[in-house]
Image: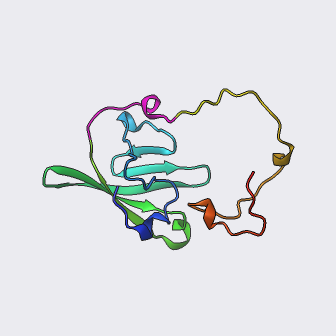
């Protein structure tokens, strides 16, 4: 994925690490928040659902996909961020095969500090950017 630094801060879901990949699974099978149908990359998060237009172009020996990615502010601005992806292979992956997995079989331990309702105050790429009054993290 090739992005200018100015674009990477506006992305809500797609990874900007050039070593990560976006998979188009057979039959439009969904994984994580992604799915697809011809001409559309479908992104459904817990709060937003977007059908992002894409087109495919050949440049020399390589096949590229240009996605008009609807970012967080899309409902207000209508703006999109163009993402350029290069096809790496034609393998038919499965959602199970590409899933990221943590060891989540953990015994329950209570933490009374977290009981209740929480509201997001901001989003930071790096924690050091947070300059609140009491910034101790435990």
The answer to whether 26 is drawn above or below residue 115 in the figure is above
- Give coordinates of residue 31: x percent, y percent: 48, 38
The residue shown at (61%, 49%) is 46
* Horizontal side of residue 100 vs 131, given as left or right: left
* Horizontal side of residue 92 vs 119, given as left or right: left
- Give coordinates of residue 18: x percent, y percent: 37, 53
* Residue found farthest to the left: 60
Residue 99 or residue 18, whichever sits in front: 18
The residue shown at (40%, 39%) is 28
Kindly report the secondary structure that dominates the magenta region of the rendered protein.
loop
Residue 18 or residue 26, whichever sits in front: 18
- Give coordinates of residue 123: x percent, y percent: 62, 62
* Residue found farthest to the bottom: 77
Residue 93 in magenta stretch: yes
Residue 63 in magenta stretch: no
The residue shown at (84%, 46%) is 115
The magenta segment is 89-100
């Amino acid at each position: 994925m090739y992005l200018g630094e100015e674009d990477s801060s506006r992305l809500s879901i797609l990874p900007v690490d050039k070593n990560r990949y976006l998979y188009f699974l057979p039959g439009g099978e969904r994984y994580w928040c992604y799915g697809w149908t011809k001409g559309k990359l479908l992104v459904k998060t817990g709060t937003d659902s977007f059908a992002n237009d894409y087109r495919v172009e050949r440049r020399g020996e390589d096949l590229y996909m240009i996605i008009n990615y609807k970012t967080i502010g899309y409902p207000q601005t209508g703006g999109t961020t163009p993402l350029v992806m290069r096809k790496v292979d034609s393998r038919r992956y499965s959602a199970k095969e590409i899933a990221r997995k943590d060891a989540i079989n953990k015994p329950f331990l209570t933490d009374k500090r977290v009981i209740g309702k929480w509201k997001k105050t901001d989003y930071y790429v790096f924690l050091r950017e947070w300059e609140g009054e009491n910034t101790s993290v435990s």
